[in-house]
């Protein structure tokens, strides 16, 4: 989100981030871009917004935009959907705590679609979200929300996320109109551009550096760590297909995969947008027997090539304590989507300031 918000013309005073590798990534890019953003590393609940405001010489009502993306696992459709029974779900309300202290002109938040129907502690479907927007209303904000598809804004990825924007009354905010659509919807009075495909954004990249050739991850993160066995297992899987559906391949190659394993050992299609990039499975290159590199993930997510990642790159079955580079991307908001929304927020903020709202 930071990248898109900066591209929209905002200056970021501070970030709060728990993961050590993510903080290293943030600090590296802040340094390279010559920004003065301060990164607070740790659990957001352990920080006092009043102290942060004092350290940054910020007074109530001076901040234009408070934005963030609380952890989504508690509300994800592919998780256990424990909502508020998962302590990560409670982090949603840190937005309220910081809004009370900062009193920003606007708030922007990103979450998975499951938030809209998540049950509260009384078992009421949608109760979590209704409680959240009620608290925003009590603080004097008018919340608006929309399920936005990244592909509609020029990002080669079929990623649906809820974007919530709350501004002070009166609220003239409107979400940005889509700029792209599927080919069958590109005609009409106001024609849209066709969806950007995976091939459109990764075709010009050179062959990646192999882990066997170099033990140091290059700054561009175009680095191939695919183990020999995973190269063997993806071999013979057609473009755009997954291994579990290829019943003609040997049983030992398919292993324990079932027909439900549609995102495991999945090749992307060069002619289409990608499936949603997530923190778990790493997708495979459309025609080569290897994982997509973090740089290819970044292209699919809309990151600029100047942006660098810090932290390890793990294999599909490997594990690391903090977020590896693929998961940093999978957890991120596509920068062009954040920019499109932030630009609309900026218009409203400027309108309010110049008309004394």
Image (spheres, rainbow, N blue to C red):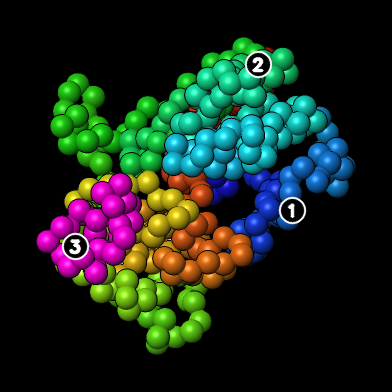
Q: Residues within 10 Å of mark 3 (few under 14, many from 20)?
A: many
Measure the alpha-carbon separation of dots 1 and 3: 42 Å
Q: Earlier in the sequence, mark 2 or mark 1?
A: 1
Q: Position of residue 152 (x, y in %)?
A: 33, 35
Q: Position of residue 290 (x, y in %)?
A: 30, 70
Residue extending farthest bottom: 213
Depth check: give the residue in front, 19 or 349. 19
Q: Earlier in the sequence, mark 1 or mark 3?
A: 1
Q: Residue at x 28, y 73 (%)?
A: 231
Q: Position of residue 1 (x, y in %)?
A: 54, 44
For disc 2, the marked residue is: 134
Q: What is the secondary structure assignment of the residue under circle 2? A: helix
Question: Eyeballing the image, is 132 above or below 285?
Answer: above
Q: Residues within 10 Å of mark 2 (few under 14, many from 20)?
A: some
Depth check: give the residue in front, 228 or 288. 228
For disc 3, the marked residue is: 237
Query: What segment is highlighted magenta in the picture?
Result: 241-265
For disc 1, the marked residue is: 42
Q: Is residue 34 visible?
A: no
Q: Position of residue 52 (x, y in %)?
A: 82, 44
Q: Quick check: 262 left or right of 281?
A: left
Q: Residue at x 57, y 60 (%)?
A: 323
Q: Earlier in the sequence, mark 2 or mark 3?
A: 2
């Amino acid at each position: 989100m930071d990248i898109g918000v900066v591209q929209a013309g905002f200056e970021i005073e501070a970030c709060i981030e728990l993961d050590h590798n993510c903080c290293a990534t943030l600090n590296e890019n802040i340094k390279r871009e010559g920004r003065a953003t301060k990164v607070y590393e740790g659990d957001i609940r352990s920080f006092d917004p009043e102290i942060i405001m004092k350290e940054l010489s910020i007074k109530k009502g001076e901040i234009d935009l408070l934005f963030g993306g609380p952890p989504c696992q508690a509300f994800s459709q592919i998780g256990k959907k424990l909502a508020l029974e998962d302590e990560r779900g409670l982090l949603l309300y840190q937005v309220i705590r910081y809004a009370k202290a900062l009193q920003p002109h606007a708030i922007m938040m990103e979450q998975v679609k499951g938030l809209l129907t998540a049950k509260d502690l009384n078992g009421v479907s949608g109760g979590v979200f209704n409680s959240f927007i009620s608290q925003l209303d009590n603080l004097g904000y008018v919340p608006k929300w929309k399920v936005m598809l990244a592909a509609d804004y020029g990002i080669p990825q079929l990623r649906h996320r809820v974007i919530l924007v709350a501004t002070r009354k009166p609220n003239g905010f409107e979400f940005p109109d889509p700029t792209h659509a599927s080919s069958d919807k590109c005609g009409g009075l106001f024609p849209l551009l066709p969806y950007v495909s995976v091939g459109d954004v990764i075709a010009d990249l050179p062959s990646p550096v192999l882990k066997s050739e170099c033990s140091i991850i290059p700054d561009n993160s175009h680095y191939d760590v695919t183990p020999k066995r995973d190269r063997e297992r993806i071999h013979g899987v057609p473009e755009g297909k997954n291994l579990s559906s290829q019943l003609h391949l040997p049983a030992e190659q398919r292993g324990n995969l079932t027909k439900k394993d549609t995102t495991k050992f999945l090749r992307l299609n060069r002619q289409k947008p990608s499936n949603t990039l997530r923190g778990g499975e790493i997708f495979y290159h459309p025609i080569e027997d290897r994982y997509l590199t973090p740089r290819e993930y970044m292209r699919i997510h809309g990151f600029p090539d100047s942006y660098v990642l810090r932290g390890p790159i793990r294999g599909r079955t490997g594990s690391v304590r903090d977020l590896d580079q693929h998961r940093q991307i999978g957890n991120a908001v596509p920068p062009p989507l954040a920019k499109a929304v932030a630009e609309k927020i900026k218009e409203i903020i400027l309108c309010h300031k110049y008309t004394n709202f």
